[in-house]
Image (cartoon, rainbow, N blue to C red):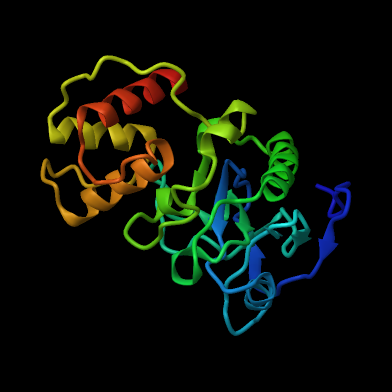
Amino acid sequence: MSDVLDIAGLREQRSPNHDARPAGQPVDILLLHYTGMPSARAALDRLVDPAARVSAHYLIEEDGTLWRLVPEDRRAWHAGVSRWAGATDINARSIGIELVNPGREFGYRPFPETQMAALERLATGILGRHPIPAHRVLGHSDVAPLRKEDPGELFEWRRLAARGLGVWPRQRREPPGWSLAEFQAALARFGYGIPQSGALDDETLATIVAFQRHFRPALIDGEPDAECASILAALLAEIG
C-alpha cells in the first residue's frame, strides 16, 4: 500500500506510537473514538507524545481539518484492552479515527456537520482500501464497554449507516422473547465480548449500555428489554 494518500487538505503530524501489524493480518475493523480532551491541540499533542504511548491513524477536528498521525499499514495504539468477535488485539486489525470532542469530562456536545462530512469522506476511502464490512465500523465503547463511552450517544451512527459506513436496523422485528442468556448469546453473535452467564452482571450491564449508545441512543438504561431485542434481531438478520 502506498504511504501517500490522495486526500484533499490532509495534514501530517507523525506519531511515534505505533508498531508493525502481524504478518498477514487484514484490516477488518474501523474504530471510531472521541478525544475527550479540552481542545484539538491538547488531543493532537497527546497523540504524538512518545510518553503517552497512545495514537490513532487519523484525527478530525470539529471544522473538518484532517490529520494523519500513523500510516494505515502500521498498528496504531488506540483501542487498548478490547474485544470483538473473539479477537483481542483490536489494534492489529483496525484503523483508528479520533474525532475532536471534549467528551463527558469537558462538555460533551454534538459532532458538527463539517466534522461528520470529513469523516464520511475519509471512512469511504478506508473501506475502499481494506476488507472492512459495514457491520465492523464500531465505536470504542463497543469493543471496550467496561472502560469507554466514546464516541457516545450524540454520534450519528444512523447517518453513517445510510452511506454504507456502518449498519442500522432498517426494520424492527417482532421481539423474539429472549431470556437474558439468549440475549447475551445474541450480542455475542453480533460481536460483543460479553459473558454468557445468564446474569445481569457488571460486564453484561456495561455491554448492553454500549449497544444502546450505538443503536438506541434515546434510552440508555442497561435493560435488555423488548425494544433492544427487536433491534438486535434485525441487525443479526441484516449481517447474516
For residue 137, what is the image quadrant?
Answer: top right
Where is residue 191 drawn, in percent x and y?
38, 38
Left or right relative to 227: residue 25:
right
Total number of numbered labels? Answer: 0
Taking the image as drawn, is residue 189 in sight? yes
Q: Residue furthest bottom?
A: 51
Residue at 64% over, 35% down: 131
Q: Quadrant of the C terminus?
A: top left
The answer to which of 112 and 32 lies nearer the viewer is: 112
Which residue does the image show at 65% across and 81% down from the upper left? 49
Q: Residue at 36% across / 18% down in the picture?
A: 172
Question: Residue 78, percent across and down?
Answer: 55, 63
Task: Say which residue appears at 34% left-offset and 26% top-offset.
Answer: 231
Above or below: residue 239 compared with residue 28:
above
Q: Is residue 98 left or right of residue 232?
A: right
Position of 147 relative to 151 (above/below): below
**x and y percent of residue 20 in the render?**
65, 62
Give whichever of 60, 58 is nearer the camera: 60
Residue 5 to residue 131: above or below: below
Task: Specify whether residue 133 is in view.
Answer: no
**Quarter occupied by residue 211:** top left
Q: How far across and how far down the image is residue 87, in percent? A: 42, 48
